């Protein structure tokens, strides 16, 4: 048995022990390529059973669209959080020009 035949057997799912046993038994690997000599029995044709009349459907109470309600609630929560963040955010205080001039002069004199 050649290495290619062993690899092919391994790809087909045989274990190492099984491949060694086949090699010891002088296995003919032609069966790996050639189709089986016995004809396969043709499957019996299955006829579909006649459809059975469905019982009258009962009226089920309509359930509210729960996913739509949840999506709407999430959107409202998001909008509320965004508004809250905008209200609570603070802009940095902008110093007036006199304060900026004093800081520049102080930096210049301290260096």
Image (cartoon, rainbow, N blue to C red):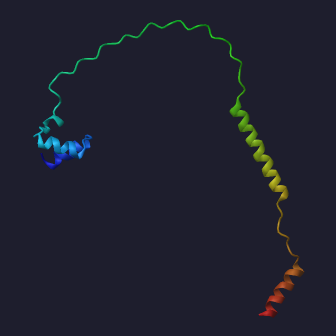
Q: Is residue 60 above or below residue 19?
A: above
Residue at image point 17% right, 47% down: 4
Name the spot of residue 72 as percent of width and height, x first: 74, 37
Q: Depth check: 53 or 5 in front?
A: 5
Q: Is residue 110 above or below residue 81?
A: below
Residue at image point 88% right, 76% down: 96
Q: Quadrant of residue 103?
A: bottom right
Name the spot of residue 53 as percent of width and height, x first: 53, 6
Q: Quadrant of residue 85?
A: bottom right
Q: Is residue 21 visible?
A: yes
Name the spot of residue 15 as percent of width and height, x first: 25, 44
- Quarter of the image with the C terminus in it: bottom right
Residue at image point 17% right, 45% down: 20
Q: Is residue 5 above or below residue 97?
A: above
Q: Depth check: 103 or 45 in front?
A: 45
Q: Is residue 44 above or below residue 102?
A: above
Residue at image point 61% right, 7% down: 56
Name the spot of residue 82 as percent of width and height, x first: 78, 51
- Quarter of the image with the N terminus in it: top left
Q: Is residue 33 visible?
A: no
Residue 92 relative to residue 48: left or right = right
């Amino acid at each position: 048995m050649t290495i290619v035949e062993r690899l092919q057997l391994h790809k087909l799912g045989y274990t190492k022990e099984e491949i060694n046993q086949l090699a010891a038994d002088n296995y003919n690997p032609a069966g790996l390529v050639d189709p089986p000599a016995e004809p396969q029995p043709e499957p019996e044709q299955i006829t579909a059973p006649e459809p059975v009349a469905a019982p009258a459907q009962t009226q089920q109470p309509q359930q509210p669209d729960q996913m739509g309600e949840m999506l709407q609630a999430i959107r409202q929560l998001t909008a509320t959080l965004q508004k809250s963040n905008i209200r609570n955010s603070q802009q940095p205080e902008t110093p007036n020009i006199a304060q900026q001039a004093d800081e520049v002069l102080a930096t210049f004199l301290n260096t």
